[in-house]
Amino acid sequence: MQLREKQYFDERATQEMNQNLKPKARTLQETLAYACRILAMTGQEAGLAGQITARSDKRRCYWTLRFGLGFDEATPDDFIEVDADLNTISGKGMANPATRFHLWVYDARPQTNAIIHTHSPYVSALVAARQPLVISQMDMTPLHNDCAFLADWPGVPIADQEGVAISEALGDKRTILLAHHGQLTTGAYIEEAAYLAVYLERAARMQVRARVFGPITPVSDELAAEAHDYLLKPSIVKGTFDYWCRQADRM
């Protein structure tokens, strides 16, 4: 049997996934609501501390879950549009004041259209110990060279200074671990930010558990980079998100 290069299989799989994995059409608010339910389903609620936003088509505005609701309660009607001063311009209610730092991330990263921030359990354990992520297993590779680390907690992020610190530390990466705080994931679209949030919590869980066996051994940069690009293909991200949506519907 002829041995083909991996590129052949990558290209073939990509083509077939684009043909066969057709993401379900949803409104922005429906996608946000599902993302919230997925976060709750994967254990990422933390009272009212969790945040989700999506860039609006209005300049320096974004959509977010109205303050006072948990992720598990979110419906499409619970999202409001706010401006740069957090004034509500569509819908009823107020934004979580801590979403102010999202504005700085959006301003610094024109490619970012969605942001998720949670205090998920294993990420919280990792950042309580002030530990960065070590990419040591295949399911962690979507975070390879894509997870920054902010070692110093700037305090509750309700002012502009926290936005500066977090956006600068994030740099060109999609995700960040915030020491003594939690995690932040970004995406070119909502599904990508949610996908990374789930996988970042999963990666932190693996790292915390693997520590009992001794030092963590990272995978090679070359293989991790290859897996990163493969597992972040939009067809895989959106197909996975659709699967999680079906799971959430069954709960």
Image: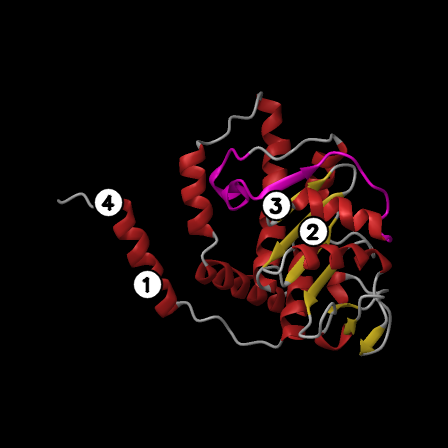
Q: Tell me how far mark 4 sits from mark 1, CA to CA.
A: 16 Å
Disc sitting over residue 200 in the figure? 3
Which mark is drawn over residue 15? Answer: 1
Q: Disc 3 on helix, strand or loop?
A: helix
Which quadrant of the figure has residue 178? top right
Q: Which of labels 2 and 1 is toward the front?
A: 1
Q: Determine which residue is flagged by label 4.
A: 5
In the rendered view of the protein, which quadrant contains the N terminus? top left
Q: Can residue 120 be seen by looking at this rendering?
A: no
What is the quadrant of residue 171 in the picture? top right
Give the percent coordinates (x, y) of residue 71. 74, 62
Q: Is residue 235 above or below residue 118?
A: below
Q: Is residue 178 left or right of residue 190?
A: right
Task: Please tell me which of labels 3 and 4 falls first in the chain.
Answer: 4
The residue under the point 86% across, 59% down is 97
Task: Between label 2 and label 4, give the one nearer the viewer.
Answer: 4
Q: Residue at x 63, y 55 (%)?
A: 186
* Badge 4 element: loop
Q: Nearer the viewer, residue 213 or 80?
A: 80
The numbered mark at residue 31 is none
Q: Which residue is mark 2?
A: 43
- First in sequence: mark 3 vs mark 1: 1
Amino acid under disc 3: Leu
Could you tell which of marks 2 and 4 lies nearer the N-terminus? 4
Q: CA distance from mark 2 to mark 1?
A: 34 Å
For marks 3 and 2, the one nearer the N-term is 2
Q: Amino acid at mark 4?
A: Glu
